[in-house]
Image: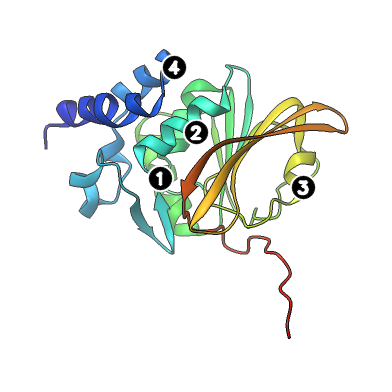
Amino acid sequence: MNVEQARYFMIEQQIRPCDVSDSKILALLAHTRRDQFVPQDSQKLAYADIHIPLGYGAAMWTPTLEAQVLQALQLKRNDQVLEVGTGSGYLTSLMAALAGHVTSVEIEPDLSRTAGERLAAHQINNVTLAVGDAAQGWREDQKFDVIVLTASTPLLPDNFRNSLTIGGRLLAIVGEGPIMKMTRITRVAENVFESEDIMDTYEIAPLRNAKVPERFVF
């Protein structure tokens, strides 16, 4: 695989046509080796616009979705970020390059360990990895400028909104398939939140133990 050529085509043929125009994000994608964050047997698919299975029911997002999420997050250099679902560590690395610090929580210990090894190999030091279940929220005593859920949730728990700083942004894929909404919530005041649907997306697997609607039983 010609890595440089594959990354060029990923950006020019997949990402730019999906209205990702932020120069910082495009430059970051151009020099970050996505193939070094995918499982060994999937490296030839690293730059294809497909979901790549990671095991344990998890999967990497497509490069296009990753880029769209990065653009929607509007990351700033001093942002404190919470990522729910570390996965491969690739999105973690991209956010770490744009923000101040990333706390990334993964429910599956093996995925967290492997992601940690990849991040260390790339000398990415402004990341704290944690193993745990953050499907309903994480560390109520800590506030974050940015929160991103890397799997879907049928219902979005209020704990995530309440963990935002004033001006903080939360990005989550909400709903149940086949079509879901990528939603950005901004905390504009202590008890005031603005919600915006960024885009529709096809079915994304839910977080393990995600909150679900109550079902009527007849």
Residue position marked by numbered label 1 in the rendering = 61
Q: Earlier in the sequence, mark 4 or mark 2?
A: 4
Cα gap from disc 4 to disc 1, whole angstroms: 19 Å
Residue 69's tag is: 2
Nearer to us in this view, 5 or 154: 154
Cα gap from disc 4 to disc 2, whole angstroms: 12 Å
Cα gap from disc 2 to disc 1, whole angstroms: 10 Å
Is the Cβ of the residue at disc 2 closer than 8 Å to that at disc 1? yes
- Structural crowding at the residue carrying mark 4, measured as other residues with C-alpha within 10 Å and reported as few (<14), some (14–19) or many (≥20): some
Is the Cβ of the residue at disc 3 closer than 8 Å to that at disc 4? no
Could you tell me the amino acid type at mark 3? Asn
Residue position marked by numbered label 3 in the rendering = 159
For the point 63% across and 57% down, which residue is it? 154
Q: Residue furthest left?
A: 1
Residue 22's tag is: 4
Q: Earlier in the sequence, mark 3 or mark 1?
A: 1
Cα gap from disc 2 to disc 3, whole angstroms: 21 Å
Q: Residue furthest right?
A: 191
Element type at marker 1?
loop
Element type at marker 2?
helix
Is label 2 or label 3 in front?
A: 2
Element type at marker 3?
helix
